[in-house]
Image: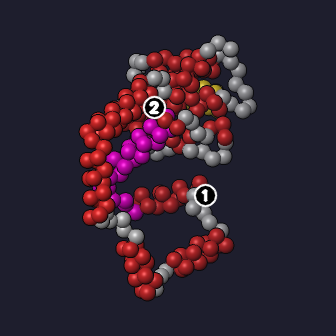
Amino acid sequence: MQFLDNKWTRIYYQLIDRARSRSPEREHELHHVIPVSFYRTNRRGSTGWLAGDPDSADNLVSVTVREHRLLHLLLTRMCVGEARAKMCLAAKMMLDQKTDPARRGSKSRVYEEIRLEANRSVGNRHRGKRRTPEDIERQRQSRIRTGANQFSEEHRAKIAEAARRKIKSPEEIAKFKATMQARQHRRSAEATAKMLETRRLKGPEWAEAVKAKWRESRRKSLLARAVKTPLEHELAAEQKPR
């Protein structure tokens, strides 16, 4: 089994079985049951650990756009280690899409968790590595193929003009430094003395009240984390009979 034995995996395969039991429609999308990035050889160039063909018929299923998004969210809860890093990155790319509202966005807490995990995995993968000329050329070809960073001549001219306007003279730089130094909020001796006097006048009861208020706020925050996450609510709603 390629996934953890937990409730998310069981829900995942329930959705897969439901999708396979119906006829595919034109607006449906193809989903790989075992992700492409898990295979050693695949068309996307990433190296995994499984042998076989990721595009085989038994590994493909036709799902709706909403199901496709939900399946990728589930995959982030079904793996650990490198597999989870791959799934978080795939889910982040799907949630970041701007062209299709049905595939964009999610609950803020779920999206934050996935995005941070994906960013950490990318950083760990490339930290301390130097890009070879082959890597640079492959990335350049990928940008050309996908249309990324392809600006028109008019847009390039606007960028160049904006960059020229940002160049400041030595006099402007000196004036800016003097302004920033004048704006530094340094507590004066009078302000410090005033704060100490306020604490003395309010007494220890006031300090204890502040600490109690902080403890209560912390307790509520921990309780809020203990309830169901937005993803769990979403999955529960998905399982309700219609």
In-image side of 208 versus 48 (left or right): left
**Total number of numbered discs in the rendering:** 2
Q: Nearer the viewer, residue 26 or 236?
A: 236
Q: From this viewpoint, is residue 197 visible?
A: yes
Vertical placement of 122 versus 213: above or below?
below
* Structural distance between the alpha carbons of marks 2 and 1: 28 Å
| Dot 2 amino acid type | Thr
Picture residue at 60% right of the left edge, 20% below the top: 238
Residue 52 visible in the picture: no
Q: Nearer the viewer, residue 185 or 82?
A: 185
Chief SS of the magenta region = helix
Q: Does the magenta portion include 129?
A: yes
Q: Is residue 10 left or right of residue 205?
A: right
Q: In the picture, which quadrant includes the N terminus?
A: top left
Q: Residue 147 — which label? A: 1
- Residue 241: x and y, percent? 64, 12
Q: Earlier in the sequence, mark 2 or mark 1?
A: 2
Q: Nearer the viewer, residue 198 or 165?
A: 198
Residue 101 lies left or right of residue 231; in this view the side is right
Q: Which residues are magenta?
A: 110-133
Dividing the picture into quadrants, the one containing residue 219 is top left
Q: Residue 27 — which label?
A: none
Identify the residue under disc 2: 76
Question: In what element is the residue under mark 1?
Answer: loop
Q: Residue 125 colored magenta?
A: yes
Q: Residues within 10 Å of mark 2 (few under 14, many from 20)?
A: many
Question: Do residues under tags 2 and 1 come within 8 Å of each other at their CB atoms?
Answer: no
Q: Quadrant of the C terminus?
A: top right
Where is residue 9? Give x, y as percent.
Answer: 47, 20
The amino acid beneath tag 1 is Gly
